[in-house]
Image: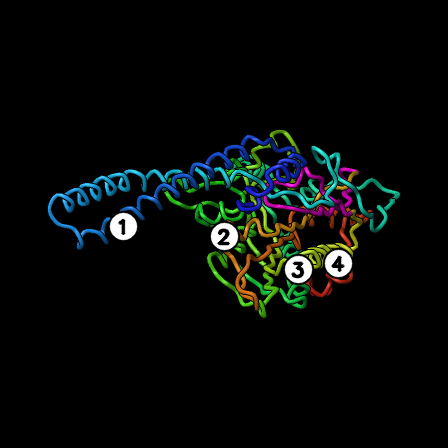
Amino acid sequence: MIDLKSLRTDPELFRASLGRKRYGSEDLDQVLAADARVRRLRADLEELRAARNSASRRIPRTTGEEKAEVLADMKRVAARLKEAEPDLRQLEDELRLALLRIPNPPHEDVPDGAGDDANVVLRQVGEPRRTSFEILDHLDLGEARGWIDVKRAARTSGSRFAYLMGELVELEFALVRFAMDRLIAAGFKPVVPPILVREAAMYGTGFFPADRNEIYKIEDEDAYLVGTSEVSLAALHMEEILPEADLPVRYAGFSTCLRKEAGSYGKDTRGIFRVHQFDKLEMFSFCTPAASHEEHLMILEMEEGILRSLEIPYQVVDVCTGDLGAPAARKYDLEAWMPGQAAYREVTSCSNCTDYQARRLGARFRGKDGTALLHTLNGTAVAIGRTIIALIENHQQEDRKVRIPADLRPYLGGRREI
């Protein structure tokens, strides 16, 4: 949530900044109008309460007709208060809902653009491998090896589901343990978080109202399935005040994630690249505002280090304003080279959400100058399905076995290939 006081002070700054996110000013106008109504009604209520208190003090000093007049005035004031106080609560709710629709303004260094074609490649690491044989894409190889079964999964669950089987399951858990060990060494606390959360957590992280159509809901319950453990990790310190001395507080959350992929009809339907259910190891950090830039770069380096250790060529992308999403002020994507598609495709991302989520969640820290809002950051350490695709395509051998990178071998009992 943006800072209402700052918006009130310089609305044109917000118009210009949010315009860079391709976001119209109608909701800003609605917030400003609702804020003005709330402030006027609050002032009116203060006057009414002052009049009631004044009359209350006069009563003991009056008698006869004068006292009757004071009592009548008090009755009229009480009636107006009874009518106005629910109106104020309704207006405050309308103001809050309007504020929730406004995204986080982008950082000034974010490149401008409307969509992913305007994202800026910052660097490429590693060279796509050249082979004397044709590399099978992950689905052809997975089906041939009995590792991936999308046909039976479609029969069981519908499209965009898959059974992972055999050595690919071993590879998944090797990836999780490999990445988790790196994160623990960097000060991240391992967490297996809930994947069902209440609506307040969805609003608190900024996924609602913007991305509601992506989220699965449990009917007749205040319960939603997370599309990323970022939601439950962020809500871990909802309405809490952390000591500054404890910061940064870093978590590594492993969970299953579920998304409707509502906006991707007909896109990436082959194999396990874009599915409704996937597993992911997510980094999340609470830190001070002064530390959030460096924390963002640290999370990015963790992601890069994992891909380098897995010997997967990749590129780092500075995500443009129109592709940031609601909560992020700045975001980097890591795109791995996928031989089966002959293209770099996103496998992880990391975002600095500044104080946007913390204001919605009520997450603060206490320092020497009092309390202030935390900054929150998130980044995917390993998106299991997409990382598996990159691994088995980039390290595929002519005999259709897959070479295991040296750093991952200890997590597969020393095996050099599967």
- Residue annotated with mark 4: 305
Does residue 105 sit above or below 233 in this rendering? above
The kind of secondary structure element at disc 3 is helix
Q: Which residue is mark 2?
A: 361
Q: CA distance from mark 1 to mark 4?
A: 69 Å
The amino acid type of the residue labelled 2 equals Leu
The residue where tag 1 is placed is 54
Q: Are marks 3 and 1 in contact (CB under 8 Å)?
A: no
Tell me: residue 221, above or below residue 416: above
Q: Of callouts 3 and 4, which one flags the residue occurring earlier in the amino acid sequence?
A: 3
- Residue at point 24% right, 43% down? 78
Q: Secondary structure at mark 1?
A: helix
Q: Secondary structure at mark 4?
A: helix
Marks 3 and 2, how far apart in space? 20 Å
| Percent x, y of residue 10 | 60, 41
Q: Which residue is mark 3?
A: 290
Judging depth in this view, the residue of 309 and 185 nearest the camera is 185
Tell me which label, 4 or 2, sits earlier in the chain: 4
Q: Amino acid at mark 3?
A: Ala
Q: Earlier in the sequence, mark 3 or mark 1?
A: 1
Circle nearer the viewer, 4 or 2: 2
Which residues, given as a range, are shown in magenta? Answer: 316-342
Q: Is residue 418 visible?
A: no
Q: Earlier in the sequence, mark 2 or mark 1?
A: 1
Residue furthest to the left in view is 64
Image location of residue 13, percent across then percent down: 64, 40
